[in-house]
Image (tube, helix red, strand yellow):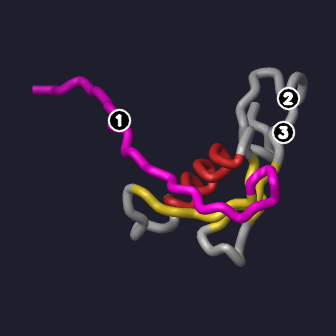
Amino acid sequence: MQCPNCGRFNYDYPKNHECPPMWQVGIYKDELEPTYGDDLLEAAERYVEDYHWSSAEWDRETTVYGIDADGQLVQILVTMEAVPTYSAEIKHA
Ligand SMILES: [Zn+2]
C-alpha cells in the first residue's frame, strides 16, 4: 500500500509506517513548498522528480532552494538521469 501523505510504499501500511519529516523546498526562494524526505537532499530530489514531469524545459540538472536543519536557506544542485526502460513482445511473421 502507498501512504497517501508521503507517497511511500509499505507492504503492510499503515503498520510500521511513519512519514518522513517535511522540508521546505522550491525553485524560487520565496515559493518554498513542504516536501517529505529523510533529509533535505532527498526532499529536493523528490521535489524535482515531481515537478519535472510537468516542466519539460528543465535541463539535466537544476538548482532549487531549501531550508536546512539549521534553518538556513541553501541552494541545492539536483542532477537528473534518464533511466532506460525495456519492453519485449512476440513478433509475428
Ligand atoms: Zn507516509
Q: Is residue 19 left or right of residue 84?
A: right
- Mark number for residue 9? none
Farthest residue to the left: give it. Answer: 93
Mark 2: is the Cβ under 8 angstroms from ligand 1? yes
Circle 3/circle 2 CB separation < 8 Å = yes
Q: Residues within 10 Å of mark 1 (few under 14, many from 20)?
A: few
**Along the horizontal axis of the image, is 65 left or right of 14?**
left
Q: For the residue marked with disc 3, what is the amino acid?
A: Cys
Q: Residue at x 72, y 68 (%)?
A: 32
Which quarter of the figure has residue 59? bottom left
The answer to whether 7 is drawn above or below residue 92 in the figure is below
The residue nearer to you, when weighing 5 against 91, is 5
For label 1, the residue is 85
- Mark 2 crowdedness (10 Å alpha carbons): few <14, some 14-19, many ≥20: few
| Identity of the residue drawn at 70% across and 75% down | 31
Q: Residue 44 or 16: which is nearer the viewer? A: 44
The residue carrying pointer 3 sits among few (fewer than 14), some (14 to 19) or many (20 or more) residues within 10 Å by Cα, namely some
Question: Where residue 30 sits: x, y (%)?
Answer: 71, 77
Q: Which residue shows up at 81% across the image and 59% down it?
A: 71
Q: Which residues lie in the magenta part?
A: 68-93
Asked whether residue 91 is drawn in magenta, I would say yes
In 3D space, how far apart are the residues under numbered discs 1 and 2 (Cα atoms)? 30 Å
Classify mark 1 as within 8 Å of ligand 1 or not, answering yes or no. Answer: no
**Location of residue 47 (image quadrant):** bottom right
Tags 3 and 1 touching, CB below 8 Å: no
The residue pinned by badge 2 equals 17
78 lies above or below 7: below
SS under mark 1:
loop
Residue picked out by circle 3: 19
